[in-house]
Amino acid sequence: MNDHSKHSVEVKIEKQDDRPAGGGGGGGSQEATRQDSIERILQRKQRVFQLPRNQKLTKLSMYSACRGPDCRCTGWKTPEENRHKDVEVDYCPSFKEECRNPNCKHPLEMHIAHLGEISDDQINELLGAIVDVENLYMSMLRETDTDTKKVYAYLFRLLRQCILTRSQPVIRGPLGDPPFEQPSISKAVTNFVLFKYSHLNQTELETMTEVAKTFLHCLNHWNFEAPSARKDLSHEDASNYKINYTRWLVFCHVPAFCSSLRHFETSIVFGRTLLKAVYQYVYQQLLTKCKIERDRMPPEKRLMLAQLPKFLEALKHEVINEESQIWDQNFKPTASLMLQKKRQHEAATSSSGKKSNDAKRYKKDSDCEDLPDDVVVKALKRLNDSNYTCRTEVVFPPNAPRDEAAKAEENRREIEFHVVGNSLTKPVTKESMLWLLGLHSVFAHQLPGMPREYISQLVFDPKHKTLALVKDGRPIGGICFRTFATQGFTEIVFCAVTSSEQVKGYGTHLMNHLKDYSTQRGIKHFLTYADEFAIGYFKKQGFSKDIKVARHVYAGYIKEYEGATLMHCELHPSLIYTQFSSVIRKQKEIVKELIAQRQQEVQKVHPGLTCFKEGLRSIPIESIPGLREVGWRPQFRTQRTARPLEESADPDKLSNALTGVLQSVRQHSAAWPFLKPVNPTEVPDYYDHIKYPMDLKTMGERLKNKYYISRRLFMADMARIFTNCRLYNSPETEYYRCANTLERYFQTKMKEIGLWDK
């Protein structure tokens, strides 16, 4: 640590302790202590902001690199005789005073030469960051936990560098970006209230909603225990908790008292993994606090507090239960709750004296109709007839599915599929260990680019499992994978089949078995890094380079490989993949037979039309003989009504109208994320996910260049802005809410000028 940092500490020690409560567990009085500390920090920042400009520049000089030629001094050092003086209180040195650093000795003005033109607001922003740096340093000195101290040190160096370079702090690395898990704790608790208490009346439901808000508020201000204090966790749980604890420190806890860093709420960016790890301790502490505080609360709060123990106990079961509905991203309120809300709304509407006119609902007639059961049964009997032969298959034999031969061998028990893995807590059978050794040999031989030590590390890692293809008692292929249940995806690490057994459909059948194995356990996504030789195989198995999983879900979990391509496969929980090709083939046969039966029923040759020879240029389509008999039905299209601004009528008038709309959208308070293109240096992976970017600046340029010859083009570009935003950002983010708000405003403006018909 440089000499300047020591000096900063000396100044800080003379002041009061502005450091909030550290990373150790807690709640209750610690929350009050933390709030008091944050207030003291804010007060100190205000005192610094009110200093004369010369004293502010002196403070900044201590954190500014010297501008002298070839000088490496990173901050002006107070002369020896003035070290006991504080620039925030009673010390304002001359700009000619020399730096105490023997390798510098340049005057103070050399450290602030670059700050002469910056505004007072920019100076205050830098001073606020300096106060944060000093508080972080004090936190680091007083912290006893090694892991927590390392996090403080990392953030201290990050902020220190940002002050030197006058840049915004950006946290990059293996921690990933918030939110880290979906659904969030806040969303799950909301789902829990709807799931558990939707049957209550309105007053009781509001009470339980307040209880849930109180619980989330406590969780957002909780000081979690350091990983070294959690001796009750297994090795894997301890590893996951350490990752989440570090994320909590960096994104939630430290930014609460360090405003230079972006702050996130714990309940918004974390999900089930963290809540499950800390719930028992939080549960016990809140019950204790509830007993102590109940009598001190006002009567209206006491009723809510009395429901807290029951709420916590019920929530505990949902946190532990692996199949709980509250953690389902597609959770929807029960029909009874929706009906109850509808009745309450109707009652409120009627009580206000307004008539509720339900909109008319039209049921659109389906273009197709189900066939009678007897027709389908007849077709099935025909297909099952031993003498049945499809005439088209005699001339054009159907292509057999890739895994047809492998499925036949499995039915004859010539090959078997087994999921095997190592364990440090349970006994592993000799057969499983021999299969793992055989799989290691297969992977090492078929994947020569992978180091043998690395293959051994993953194949025998208890966190990884391998789907083994066993033939004649020995493995001839397999897929090594690791499942991240909390994130909802499985990472495929190795996939190989012995070269002498390839081109037999084993690879496809292996992947189908793994898909069935995963869907049975609630996993809906596969991710893998494929080299250039494996991309074709994975494409045949339904993988794509279009990653439909948000980056924060897998960042920091999946292993990344240089020169490989990330691929994704989405699984459908209703499909049985090992039977999928057979089902599709059977469906095709049924359709062909139904078509053949229908053709026999309408097998009638009509004479050709002669009306055209007689000079008739056109006839109604429904007058063609035999057309109705084969199932044709007339389609009626609604006539398009005229609109005030037709595109072809007056291009200049349309351009002026669209210019007014675009100007109004730009000036809206929710338009700030979309004013200009996304900077790839600030969001490096944005253009990996968004293939067709759009922004309001680009739309303005297109409007000037007469690109929008129709309102449809203008509406399509605007819709793309909002679609891209919702695709890249999660629903809890501010960007997502801005997109929804601005989209509604845009539609309103288009309706006002008569250019909206959706």
Image (cartoon, helix red, strand yellow):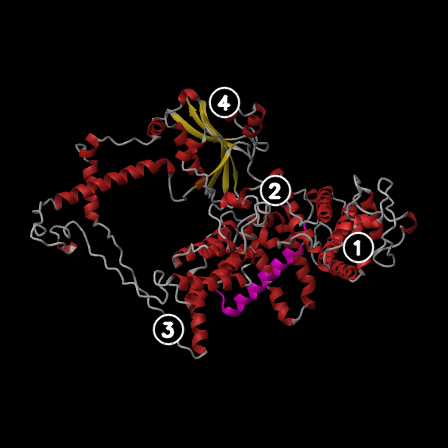
In three-dimensional space, the C-alpha distance between marks 4 and 2, rounded to whole angstroms, equals 31 Å
* Mark 2 vs 3, N-terminal side: 2
Residue 111: percent from left, percent from top: 80, 48
Q: Is label 1 in contact with label 4 (beta carbons under 8 Å)?
A: no
Task: Read off the residue under disc 4.
Answer: 438
Amino acid carrying label 3: it is: Asn
For this view, does 2 lie left or right of residue 592? Answer: right
In three-dimensional space, the C-alpha distance between marks 2 and 1, rounded to whole angstroms, equals 45 Å
- Dot label at residue 57: 1
Circle 3 crowding by C-alpha within 10 Å: few under 14, some 14–19, many from 20: few
Whether 724 is drawn above or below 451: the answer is below
Q: Which of marks 2 and 3 is in front?
A: 3
Q: Nearer the viewer, mark 4 or mark 3?
A: 3
Amino acid carrying label 2: it is: Asn
Check disc 4 and report its element: helix, strand or loop: helix
Task: Read off the residue under disc 2.
Answer: 240
For this view, does 258 lie left or right of residue 583? Answer: right
The one nearer the camera, 23 or 685, is 685
User: Measuring 50% from the left and 22% from the top, which residue is drawn there?
Assistant: 438
Task: State yes or no: residue 217 in magenta.
Answer: yes
Q: Which of marks 3 and 1 is in front?
A: 1
User: Measuring 57% from the left and 24% from the top, which residue is drawn there?
Assistant: 451
Bounds of the magenta segment: 199-224
Check disc 1 and report its element: helix, strand or loop: helix
Whether 512 is drawn above or below 49: the answer is above
Check disc 3 and report its element: helix, strand or loop: loop
Task: State yes or no: residue 548 in magenta.
Answer: no
Task: Read off the residue under disc 3.
Answer: 357
Circle 4 crowding by C-alpha within 10 Å: few under 14, some 14–19, many from 20: some
Circle 1 crowding by C-alpha within 10 Å: few under 14, some 14–19, many from 20: many
